[in-house]
Amino acid sequence: MVLLHVLFEHAAGYALFVVKEVEEIGMLLPQVEDCVLNIGKFNGMVSLAAFFPFKSAQAALDNINAISEGVVHADLKLFLETNLPIGGKKKAMLGVGDAKIGGALQEELGLAIQTGGVVAEILRGVRLHFHSLVKGLTAQAASKAQLGLGHSYSRAKVKFNVNRSDNMIIQSIALLDQLDKDINTFSMRVREWYGYHFPELIKIVTDNSTYCKMTQLIGNRKELSEESLESMEEVVMDSAKAQSILEASRSSMGMDISPIDLINIERFSNRVVSLAAYRLELQEYLHSKMGQVAPNLAALIGDVVGARLISHAGSLTNLAKYPASTVQILGAEKALFRALKTRGNTPKYGLIFHSTFIGRAAAKNKGRISRYLANKCTIASRIDAFSDVPTCVFGDKLRDQVEERLSFYETGEAPRKNLDVMKEAVIQAGEVAAEIKIKLAKKEKKRKKREKKLAALSTGDGEEEAGDGEAGATENGEAKKKKKKKSVSEAVQMGEEASAAENGDAPAKKKKKRKSEAMEVEPVAEEAPETPQTEKKKKRKKKD
């Protein structure tokens, strides 16, 4: 009787399930598929034997990385050794979802492994009802664990230095090749279009971008004069060519052209010139990116060829994994398979043919130098892919070795041994790496100081604003108190004046403002009409 256990890897931990009546389940596979969706029936088929929760998110990430790479983690090994019955009458068989980890477990623990078939269906049911099968685990907690582990796993997989991203190189070289095709096509269109008006210019100016610039400069050939000779010399960089263009314009067999057609030709040629200028900028960008990502490969074989190798391989890591024989014919796959099919001669080189070394070698030595160059390209790509501090020391040394090998094929002079060259390169690379690290440490210190200053300034500004707010609040309070005192004193003064006016007595002392107000009010009082009270007062004064 075979006792089947199923291992399920979850974001929360490892779970080991016992499958009941494995023989019947194996025979009734369609019934298993139907029972997967029903939790009641599925509980009758499968029961939880053991559960090992991960202690932390880092532990979960380490375990899931080991599983994805097909490596048995120490936690998984301990869990299976503890909970899986190895001895006894019943033979234990372990069902796993991934054949890769199954093979590793078979080598590590010597277990009988089963994958696919019934195991796949049971794992599908376990995945669906996992939170119900494990006590104390809710669906929300299980989904949170899966989400957190998924984010951390993806972050660890795509974690790289932004400055050393080879994806930008792949896109740049693809765009560069596309621009070359487009500029060539558009330039031919300008030549054909403007050739109706000035056909002799095509033979004199052969370069595409220069031809478009000359089209913009000349315009109507009948208006061309000796005054424009200097500007033409600046474009063509040759006085004899400029003079021949001027002479050809006077005796040209081209047709006349209307102003509107000339405007359209000039606009189109302007676009082609701008595309050519952008291509130069893109080439500079590619040069800088290759210096950051693959400096040794760029120093050995050049920016464009190195970028094409990376692009064809898919990434710098993939290129580093290739053997030298694959790098040698990379880009010539069609010719290789055609030669294998027809039993002809296989190609000697692929993309590395565009390197200057193969062009300089003699015909009989092209295959030998391409094999040697592919060997050195593989070494350079591996150094670039797995070195912490990128330097071009190894690339320069490898380039010198290829030069020495070329001279050996031509003159017979023996080149230096690879061991001696690599020893020198290691010493120089260590010195350069130390200098780069010192510079990076200084930059980091400066950045931290800048951040501290900014933080101090921001806290100081906050304190000043708070102080200003408190001072403003105290000033407002004092002003309000003063206003209250003024209003109280004014009210008291007005009451005294009113009582004095009723008694007929004037106040003894008045402020200057009050006096000026009284002086202003007196003439108005004289002009006012006399009331009976004022008449009585006058009579009393006369009697006295």
Image (tube, grey):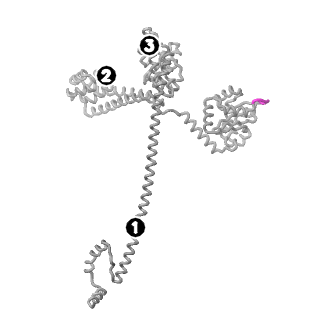
Residue type highlighted by circle 1? Lys
Please state which of the two labelled residues, at mark 3 or mark 2, is closer to the viewer.
3
- Which corner quadrant holds the C terminus? bottom left
Identify residue for label 1. Answer: 483
Decide if residue 69 is on the left or right side of residue 207. Answer: right
Please state which of the two labelled residues, at mark 1 or mark 2, is closer to the viewer.
1
Dot 3: what SS? helix
Q: Which residues are magenta?
A: 86-90
Residue 4 location (% of width, % of height): 73, 32
Residue 111 in sight from this viewpoint:
yes
Furthest residue in direction top, as rendered? 412
Dot 2: what SS? loop
- Give yes or no for contact between labels 1 and 2 (Cβ–Cβ under 8 Å): no
Identify residue for label 2. Answer: 206
Residue 342 location (% of width, % of height): 52, 14
Q: Residue at x 50, y 23 (%)?
A: 381
- Give yes or no for contact between labels 3 and 2 (Cβ–Cβ under 8 Å): no
Q: Residue at x 33, y 82 (%)?
A: 505
Could you tell which of marks 1 and 2 lies nearer the N-terminus? Answer: 2
Residue 519 location (% of width, % of height): 27, 75
Q: Nearer the viewer, residue 219 or 364?
A: 364
Residue 89: in magenta span = yes
